[in-house]
């Protein structure tokens, strides 16, 4: 459903920065509801204010990265959005609904955490894990479920690993299995917390390419935490920079310039690059 809304439209040379004003104009456009709407979010962990008054919106089809230094509150922000931890103040909507009202719509959200802790000796196969992402959770019980699992594994190029134990997988293989788990049924939104962690540089490029191709094919939105600024620059269309507070939000070409990175990470920050298939 579309409706006209009023937005602040920042020119490409400007940034939406906390505590600063930039040239902007009000435009009336037709757009979809945001898939994620966060307003004035504050999260307190113990006596520490981990996230302070953060606001942003993510619209359908976007691949948005959250970046910032260690301890900036990136994973805390993701966990609060998903309702995994409580927040002190603010407002969160996902898919046009508050978390408490999502109900049956939770299945339209896929989530891959930063770390998946499990007993590697547990006798669970790749296909069995992926099948748990289907509605009415349980191991495979019907031809339709089997076909859905096979299709999901084919999409992540793991169709020959269906009977393999999850404890024997490499880091990159496990991340692809979790992606298949997310996509074994249709999703509107994928939330990924440092999904590239534990993957070698070649695997990072391959995973980013795979994710980009699947997004293009299926049309889901992505909100991801990332430390790999080269991958963010190559594959994301929006970047949210935080260090407890929102520092900037915009296109990678604007948010990831040298001046902004120095303000986000500090002087002397060195940005690393690696060859991306997307950039040749």
Image: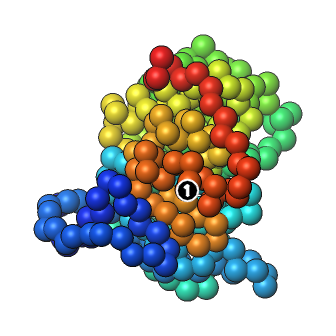
In the rendered view, tell whether residue 244 sits above or below residue 70. Answer: below
Q: Please give left or right for residue 47 compared with residue 86 in the image.
A: right
Q: Residue at x 57, y 26 (%)?
A: 205
Report the quarter where the N terminus lies.
bottom left
Residue 102 visible here: no
In the rendered view, tell whether residue 9 sits above or below residue 219. Answer: below
Q: Residue at x 84, y 41 (%)?
A: 119
Q: Residue at x 63, y 59 (%)?
A: 264
x then y, percent, for residue 178 = 60, 37
Q: Please give left or right for residue 205 compared with residue 56 in the image.
A: right
x then y, percent, for residue 10 = 30, 63
**Residue under numbered circle 1:** 260
Choose between 35 and 274: the one closer to the eye: 274
x then y, percent, for residue 159 = 55, 17
In the rendered view, tell whether residue 102 sits above or below residue 231. Answer: below
Q: Please give left or right for residue 279 compared with residue 165 in the image.
A: left
Q: How is the image coloured?
A: rainbow
Choose between 195 and 94: the one closer to the eye: 195
């Amino acid at each position: 459903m579309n409706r006209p809304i009023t937005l602040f439209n920042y020119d490409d040379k400007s940034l939406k920065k906390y505590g600063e004003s930039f040239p902007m104009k009000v435009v009336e456009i037709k757009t979809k509801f945001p898939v994620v709407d966060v307003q004035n979010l504050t999260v307190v962990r113990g006596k520490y204010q981990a996230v302070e008054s953060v606001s942003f919106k993510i619209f359908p089809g976007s691949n948005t990265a959250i970046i910032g230094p260690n301890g900036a509150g990136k994973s805390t922000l993701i966990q609060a959005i998903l309702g995994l931890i409580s927040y002190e103040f603010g407002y969160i909507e996902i898919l046009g609904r508050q978390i408490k009202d999502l109900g049956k719509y939770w299945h339209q959200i896929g989530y891959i955490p930063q770390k998946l802790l499990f007993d590697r000796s547990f006798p669970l196969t790749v296909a069995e894990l992926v099948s748990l992402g289907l509605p009415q959770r349980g191991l495979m019980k019907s031809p339709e479920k089997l076909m859905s699992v096979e299709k999901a594994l084919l999409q992540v190029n793991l169709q020959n690993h269906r009977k393999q134990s999850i404890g024997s997988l490499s880091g990159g293989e496990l991340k692809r299995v979790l992606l298949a788990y997310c996509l074994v049924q249709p999703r509107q939104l994928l939330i990924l917390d440092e999904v590239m962690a534990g993957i070698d540089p070649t695997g990072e490029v391959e995973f980013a390419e795979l994710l980009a191709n699947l997004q293009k094919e299926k049309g889901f939105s992505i909100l991801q935490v990332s430390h790999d600024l080269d991958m963010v620059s190559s594959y994301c269309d929006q970047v949210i920079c935080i260090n407890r507070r929102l520092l900037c939000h915009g296109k990678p070409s604007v948010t990831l310039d040298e001046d902004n990175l120095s303000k986000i990470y500090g002087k002397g920050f060195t940005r690393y690059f690696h060859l991306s298939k997307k950039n040749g």
